[in-house]
Image: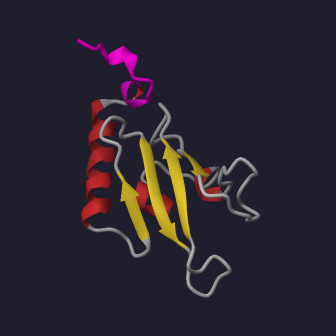
Amino acid sequence: MATAGTMSNNVENLSPQIIRRVVKEMEDLVSNPPEGIKVQINDEDVTDIQAYIDGPAGTPYMSGVFKVKLTLGKGFPQEPPKAFFLTKIFHPNVAANGEICVNTLKKDWKSDLGIKHILL
C-alpha cells in the first residue's frame, strides 16, 4: 500500500477547501473552456495545471499553440501561482526559463483571481 508521502506534489500543502476550489475551477474550465484555451487535468496532482493556448489572431503568435504550466504553491490563493511557458517563446514578459513575469502574478495578485483569469 502506497503512503501519501510517496508522491512529490503540492496537494498535501493545500487545505481541503483550496483543493476543492481548484478542482471545481478546473472542472469548469474543461466543461466551459475559454476560447482558444484547452486545459489538461492531472488527476494525481491538482496543483499541476497545464493548458494549451492558441496564439491570438493578428499577432506574430497567430496559428501557434503554446503549452503553459501553472504551479500552485502552499501559499495559494494568498500567493500567486508560478506560471511557465513549456513551449519555447520569445516575449518581453517571458524569462529564458519560460517563467511568465506579469504584474497579475506579482504585485497585482489578488487571492480571488482564479485560474481562468491567469490563463486568459
94 sits left or right of 77 in the view: right
Total number of numbered labels? Answer: 0
x 28%, y 32%: residue:
16
Q: Quadrant of the N terminus?
A: top left
Q: Quadrant of residue 19?
A: top left
Q: Estimate the x, y position of residue 59 in percent, counting from the top left.
A: 65, 82
Q: Estimate the x, y position of residue 114 in percent, counting from the top left.
A: 41, 55
Q: Estimate the x, y position of residue 76 in percent, counting from the top left.
A: 46, 39
30 sits left or right of 83 in the view: left
Q: Nearer the viewer, residue 108 or 86?
A: 86
x 26%, y 50%: residue:
24
Q: Quadrant of residue 80?
A: top right
Q: Is residue 96 above or below residue 60?
A: above
Query: In this view of the protein, can residue 94 be seen by the observer?
Result: yes
Q: Quadrant of residue 25?
A: bottom left
User: How did the renderer colour the structure?
Assistant: secondary structure
x 47%, y 31%: residue:
74
Give yes or no for residue 2 being in the magenta stretch. Answer: yes
x 45%, y 24%: residue:
8
Q: Is residue 66 above or below residue 86?
A: below
Give yes or no for residue 5 being in the magenta stretch. Answer: yes
Query: In this view of the protein, can residue 120 be seen by the observer?
Result: no
Q: Nearer the viewer, residue 98 or 29?
A: 98
103 sits left or right of 16 in the view: right
Residue farthest to the bottom? 58
Q: Estimate the x, y position of residue 60 in percent, counting from the top left.
A: 68, 80
Q: Nearer the viewer, residue 57 or 119?
A: 57
Q: Is residue 16 above or below residue 93?
A: above
Magenta residues (range): 1-12
